Image (cartoon, helix red, strand yellow):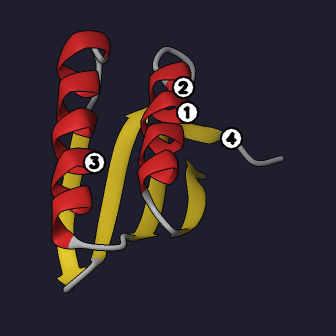
């Protein structure tokens, strides 16, 4: 049987944008969403990988903040032209 360690989930997203302005708007909107709604967010990392690609990593409590993570990645997807999302749960 696998047990969840620390009840934490890592979400990795990669988003491609039409231009830097659109990427900037997405990053600002993501930060505002987190500041308003995520009381227990453990880690948020946004990195510009290429001219128009943004990598986002969120580490959150799996059960308390899952709706915030879904909102965050959904909002980023609306701004982007291409996207990929992967989740990893830490298990024993």
Q: From the top left corner, tell me how far across and down residue 72 is, in percent.
A: 42, 36
Residue identifier under label 3 = 26
Gap in angstroms between the C-alphas marked 4 and 1: 23 Å
Residue that appears at 30% across and 18% down = 38
Of discs 4 and 1, which sits in the foreground? 1
Of discs 2 and 4, which sits in the foreground? 2
Residue 3 disc label: 4
Gap in angstroms between the C-alphas marked 3 and 1: 15 Å
Residue 70 disc label: 1
Gap in angstroms between the C-alphas marked 1 and 2: 6 Å
The reply to whether discs 1 and 2 touch (Cβ–Cβ < 8 Å) is: yes
Gap in angstroms between the C-alphas marked 4 and 3: 35 Å
Of discs 1 and 2, which sits in the foreground? 1
Near-viewer residue (74 or 90) = 74
Asked if residue 12 lies left or right of residue 51, the reply is right
Label 4: which secondary element: loop
Q: Earlier in the sequence, mark 4 or mark 3?
A: 4
Q: Earlier in the sequence, mark 3 or mark 1?
A: 3
Residue identifier under label 2 = 66
Can you tell which quarter of the image residue 30 is in? top left
Label 3: which secondary element: helix
Q: Earlier in the sequence, mark 2 or mark 4?
A: 4
Instruction: Please say if 66 is above or below 24.
Output: above
Near-viewer residue (12 or 23) = 23
Q: Earlier in the sequence, mark 3 or mark 2?
A: 3
* Label 1 Cα crowd, 10 Å radius (few <14 / some 14-19 / many 20+): few
Q: From the top left corner, tell me how far across and down residue 15 is, in percent.
A: 42, 68
Residue that appears at 16% across and 40% down = 28
The reply to whether discs 2 and 4 touch (Cβ–Cβ < 8 Å) is: no
* Label 3 Cα crowd, 10 Å radius (few <14 / some 14-19 / many 20+): many
Can you name the residue that lies furthest to the bottom here? 50
Of discs 4 and 3, which sits in the foreground? 3
């Amino acid at each position: 049987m696998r047990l969840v360690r620390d009840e934490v989930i890592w979400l990795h997203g990669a988003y491609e944008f039409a231009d830097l302005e659109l990427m900037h708007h997405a990053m600002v909107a993501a930060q505002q969403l987190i500041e308003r709604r995520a009381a227990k967010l453990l880690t948020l990392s946004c990195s510009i990988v290429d001219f128009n690609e943004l990598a986002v990593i969120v580490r959150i409590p799996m059960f308390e903040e899952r709706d915030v993570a879904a909102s965050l990645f959904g909002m980023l997807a609306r701004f982007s032209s291409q996207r990929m999302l992967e989740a990893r749960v830490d298990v024993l």
